[in-house]
Image (cartoon, rainbow, N blue to C red):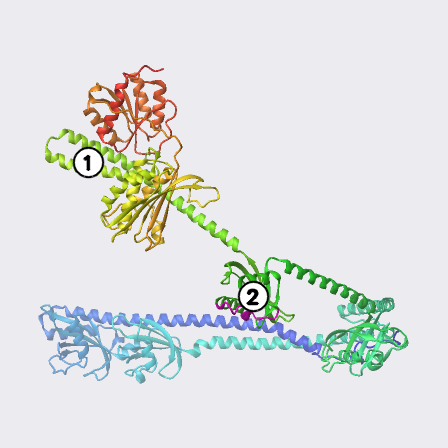
């Protein structure tokens, strides 16, 4: 369908819109362009006036300071003249008549402008003695300026008075006074009085500009002089607000009212000598007059510019209005579908728009033809609705789509909707003709029931543009037959629903077969979903089978504690919180299981909370593995700590052994050279202290696993039974000693002496823990530890002999037990233990290839168990040559190699004292050099093990390779050394600190076996 004629774009042919006339707009443009210029000019004028005003204010302040200086200079000159008179011979002689004549002569020589000055002489009480206004000798009254006289007498300095009335002159005066001394004491005051007219003359002589006012006032804020109307205001106080401003400071400025009531700008300055204040005032009208004149000039000039600009704007606007009217005529013709015609005006841009409108009319005609063809081919119709009349007009296939006759073009909305499904007519009509009639867009789909065709689905889309004058009178849009599209969509929707149902069945199967527990509850905490794993777990833990709809709280009613925990967690989730937590649950009949639980919310399409669900995973085995890992890590850290402490204590013990060796050897030398019993007794005490220090280092070396052990097969049970008597005597009668061992136990590979010391240390610790008595039990057992058996830290699988020492004492706390094996750690008081007992036990077990465990609790006693490796079937020990008698040894030369100077010196001394010839070397290289020089002619090599550059073992291997017959003895503060290796079989090793007689016995045991060393091979 097509229209018979073109339509107006507005629907009614009206083309008049709102807005202002073009000429008014141009006028506003001129004003907008000129106003910023005028404002800027006014601002610049104001800035210039401010600068001028600031300059005047600064001038006023400078003038006030100048006046203050002038007054000070005047007063200083008067004071100087008085001081000259005060020291004149006449004054010093007290010749008052002569002094009177001299003062009269001085006054005659003063500038005539200072007329009215006179000089007086007063005593300390203010009584005038002479006055140049009266002949000498005439009786004189007491001065009215007593206050200044008093200040001169008190200070002995020149002073200036405030305003006072003259007694003789009967006029307001000020005075300058100086002291007149006689014999170093001020007994008279010489003063010069000045009429205030003279001060006013000083102010007037400064050349004040017209209208400016200068004044001065004394310390009491009483006016002394004034350039304007002094007769009115001299002697009057200044205004209170002025007095408060000038009370502080030496200079300043402010605004106030003058004495005449004129607004003025005041600047003031303080005189230095008198302390008076000088002020200069400028009327504010004088300050602001340049600004007012400049602003008036700018205002008049701006008005002239605005009027000229307005006239030009109106003239140009009249010409532009005609051009715009011509352009509007062409636009209205285009809106009616007519050719716009040529536009010719005096404005080039308007002519260009006219040409553009003509081109647009041509293209619009082409576009409408193309649109009509496209609608006919695309099964689409276009419509336009006049909402005021309810008339709808259609183009293209609009009538055909709505099931109407093809010739229908423009008709009321009801006629166009007559074949729409009755149930949907109201909805379509409300979209086309809404009650509010507001602008906007809309879209809907509805069913059409044509009388001679199947039902069809129609899509209606429209837009309601806003009118220029407000409101929305028209609506435009399209109609489209979407029956095929709708059918295809419904087919796809059915397929999607089937796939969704299949997905839900698959999802339900996955949840049901999952080993994780899944459950959900509603807002009342009733089950709305759970899988089989959750159901089976609930049955296993609590013996209850949950059902859909059951209350969670009722399901767990038989276990109140579990019920409280579960309800708290579900309530937390129902509050909207999403969280993950690990908890352990279990019923009275089942084991506790650890679970990782994730809670989340269930919400409907609107986002409202309808329930919560949980995903639960049984992490019991993981928790156990993590716990085992944590225990292993703690054990490893403890072992590493003990190893570090062991290395530290081993190094300390080595250095301590060297010191003890030097001390012990020196004590032996002193004892050999002293005969007195009184000296030998303290030497014996010192030697006993060395022995005790040696025992302490042995404990340290035992803890650090660096003591020298001589392990062999030991029957631990027999050793324990053999120690029972010793322990009973050592521990006292309040402690019972029990031995729990049986015959046929495995032998242990251990140093028996060190084992006895370890058991004795453990027994002593047990005695201290059983202060009130108790039972000490020694227990032995065989332990075969396989790869899967629980094992103490650091212990390899194998056969072990377990030796346990148990007491019934107080036990230890966990904190004390954690540090029990640390060296020097003790809970005993000062002087009651070294803290090395358990450390030595730990070191012995570790160095022997075993371990030690500690089982203790406060109040339950303590059990310490040593795990010692099982001895092989046959165990052999090397025979140590027996010491030989001293008579068998002849003179011999010993090469002593020791890097510690103290040890080397002491050892060489007692060897020399025992008949040996001693050669000394500080290290292996020096020893080899010495042997080369003697061609090996040395009877025995005595060397330390730990030396810089070359160890003792390396030195012995080198010496044996060149001089095989040269015997050697190794001494060391360490117990842990590498194996001697081939060529050093039977090497004698002596542990530091050693007693000199022990070392001599070892040396003499070796020397008779050989003669002098042979030549190098």
Residue holding disc 1: 687
Residue 338 in picture, x, y percent from top left: 85, 74
Look at the image and say whether residue 549 sits in the magenta stretch.
Answer: yes
**Residue 956 percent coordinates (x, y):** 34, 24
* Image x and y of residue 425, in percent: 80, 80
Q: Quadrant of residue 395?
A: bottom right
Magenta range is 548-560
Task: Indicate whether 519 appears above or below 392.
Answer: above
Q: Position of residue 69 (x, y in %)?
A: 30, 70
Label 1 crowd (10 A; few <14 / some 14-19 / many >=20): many
Q: Secondary structure at mark 2?
A: loop
Residue 71 visible in the displayed image: yes
Residue found 25% across the figure and 52% down from its top = 773
User: Mark on residue 909?
Assistant: none
State the residue lying farthest toward the front: 743
Disc 1 on helix, strand or loop? helix
Contact check, label 2 and label 1, Cβ < 8 Å? no
Image position of 963 (left or right of 889): right
Q: Which residue has dot 2 on it?
A: 544
Q: Quadrant of the N terminus?
A: bottom right
Tell me what residue is drawn at x 38 percent, y 34 percent: 871
Relative side of 302 to 173, left or right: right
Image quadrant of residue 132?
Answer: bottom left
Q: Closer to the N terminus: mark 2 or mark 1?
A: 2
């Amino acid at each position: 369908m097509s229209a018979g004629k073109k339509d107006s774009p507005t629907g009614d042919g009206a083309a008049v819109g709102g807005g202002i006339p073009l000429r008014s707009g141009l006028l506003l443009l001129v004003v907008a362009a000129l106003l910023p210029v005028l404002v800027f000019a006014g601002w610049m004028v104001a800035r210039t006036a401010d600068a001028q005003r600031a300059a005047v204010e600064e001038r006023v302040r400078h003038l006030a300071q100048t006046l203050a200086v002038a007054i000070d200079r005047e007063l200083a000159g008067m004071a100087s003249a008085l001081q000259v008179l005060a020291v004149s011979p006449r004054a010093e002689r007290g010749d008052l008549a002569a002094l009177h004549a001299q003062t009269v002569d001085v006054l005659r020589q003063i500038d005539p402008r200072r007329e009215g000055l006179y000089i007086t002489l007063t005593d300390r009480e203010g009584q005038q003695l002479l006055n140049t206004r009266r002949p000498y000798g005439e009786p004189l009254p007491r001065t009215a300026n007593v206050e200044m006289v008093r200040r001169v007498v008190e200070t002995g300095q020149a002073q200036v008075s405030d305003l006072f009335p003259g007694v003789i002159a009967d006029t307001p005066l000020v005075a300058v006074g100086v002291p007149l001394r006689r014999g170093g004491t001020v007994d008279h005051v010489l003063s010069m009085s000045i009429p205030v007219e003279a001060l006013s003359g000083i102010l007037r002589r400064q050349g004040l500009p017209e209208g400016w006012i200068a004044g001065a006032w004394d310390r009491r804020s009483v006016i002394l002089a004034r350039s304007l109307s002094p007769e009115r205001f001299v002697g009057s106080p200044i205004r209170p607000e002025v007095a408060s401003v000038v009370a502080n400071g030496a200079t300043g400025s402010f605004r106030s009212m003058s004495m005449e009531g004129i607004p003025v700008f005041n600047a003031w300055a303080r005189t230095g000598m008198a302390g008076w204040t000088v002020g200069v005032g400028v009327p504010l009208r004088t300050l602001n007059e340049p600004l007012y004149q400049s602003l008036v000039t700018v205002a008049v000039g701006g008005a002239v510019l605005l009027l000229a600009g307005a006239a030009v704007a109106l003239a140009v606007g009249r010409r532009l209005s005609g051009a715009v009217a011509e352009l509007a005529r062409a636009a209205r013709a285009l809106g009616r579908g007519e050719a716009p015609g040529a536009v010719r005006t005096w404005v080039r841009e308007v002519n260009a728009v006219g040409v553009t409108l003509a081109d647009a009319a041509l293209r619009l005609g082409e576009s409408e033809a193309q649109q009509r063809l496209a609608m006919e081919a695309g099964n689409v119709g276009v419509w336009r609705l006049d909402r005021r009349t309810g008339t709808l007009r259609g183009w293209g296939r609009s009538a055909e789509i709505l099931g109407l006759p093809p010739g229908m073009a423009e008709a009321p909305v009801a006629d166009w909707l007559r074949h729409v499904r009755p149930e949907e007519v109201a909805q379509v009509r409300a979209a086309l003709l809404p009650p509010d009639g507001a602008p906007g867009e809309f879209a809907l789909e509805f069913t059409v029931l044509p009388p001679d065709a199947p039902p069809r689905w129609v899509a209606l889309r429209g837009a309601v543009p806003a009118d220029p004058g407000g409101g929305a009178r028209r609506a435009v849009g399209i109609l489209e037959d979407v029956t095929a599209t709708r059918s295809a969509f419904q087919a796809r929707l059915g397929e999607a629903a089937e796939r969704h149902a299949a997905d839900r069945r698959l999802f339900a199967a996955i949840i049901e077969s999952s080993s994780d527990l899944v459950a959900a509850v509603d807002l009342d905490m009733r089950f709305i979903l759970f899988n089989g794993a959750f159901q089976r777990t609930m049955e296993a833990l609590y013996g209850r089978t949950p059902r859909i709809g059951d209350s969670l709280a009722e399901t767990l009613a038989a276990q109140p504690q579990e019920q409280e925990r579960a309800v708290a967690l579900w309530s937390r989730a129902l509050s909207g919180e999403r969280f993950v937590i690990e908890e352990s649950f279990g019923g009275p009949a089942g084991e506790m299981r650890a679970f990782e639980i994730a809670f989340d919310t269930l919400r409907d399409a609107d986002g409202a909370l309808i329930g919560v669900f949980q995903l639960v995973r049984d992490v019991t085995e993981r928790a156990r593995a993590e716990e085992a890992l944590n225990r292993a890590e703690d054990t490893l850290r403890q072992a590493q700590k003990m190893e570090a402490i062991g290395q530290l204590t081993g190094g300390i013990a080595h250095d301590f052994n060297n010191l003890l060796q030097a001390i012990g050897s020196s004590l032996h030398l002193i004892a050999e050279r002293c005969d007195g019993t009184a000296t030998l007794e303290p030497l014996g005490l010192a030697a006993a202290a060395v022995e005790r220090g040696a025992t302490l280092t042995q404990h340290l070396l035992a803890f650090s696993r660096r003591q020298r052990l001589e392990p062999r097969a030991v029957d631990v049970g027999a050793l324990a039974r053999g120690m029972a008597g010793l322990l009973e005597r050592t521990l006292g009668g309040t402690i019972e000693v029990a031995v729990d061992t049986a015959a046929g136990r495995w032998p242990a590979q251990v140093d028996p002496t060190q084992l006895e010391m370890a058991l004795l240390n453990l027994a002593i610790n047990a005695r201290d823990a059983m202060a009130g008595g108790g039972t000490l039990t020694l227990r032995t057992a065989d332990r075969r530890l396989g790869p899967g058996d629980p094992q103490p830290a650091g212990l390899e699988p194998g056969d072990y002999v377990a030796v346990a020492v148990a007491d019934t004492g107080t036990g230890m706390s966990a904190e004390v037990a954690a540090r029990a094996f640390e060296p020097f750690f003790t809970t005993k008081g000062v002087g009651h233990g070294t803290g090395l007992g358990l450390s030595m036990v730990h070191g012995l077990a570790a160095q022997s290839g075993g371990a030690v465990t500690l089982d203790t609790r406060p109040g339950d006693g303590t059990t310490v168990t040593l795990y010692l490796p099982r001895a092989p079937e046959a165990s052999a020990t090397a025979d140590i040559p027996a010491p030989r008698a001293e008579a068998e040894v002849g003179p011999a030369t010993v090469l002593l190699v020791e890097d510690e100077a103290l040890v080397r010196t002491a050892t060489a001394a007692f060897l020399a004292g025992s008949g040996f010839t001693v050669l000394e070397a500080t290290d292996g290289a020096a020893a080899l050099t010495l042997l080369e020089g003697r061609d090996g002619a040395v009877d025995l090599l005595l060397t330390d093990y730990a030396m810089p550059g070359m160890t003792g073992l390396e030195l012995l291997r080198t010496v044996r390779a060149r001089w095989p017959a040269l015997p050697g003895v190794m001494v060391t503060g360490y117990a842990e050394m590498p194996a001697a290796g081939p060529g050093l079989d039977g090497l004698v090793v002596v542990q530091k600190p050693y007693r000199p007689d022990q070392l001599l016995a070892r040396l003499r045991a070796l020397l008779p076996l050989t003669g002098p060393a042979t030549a190098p091979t």
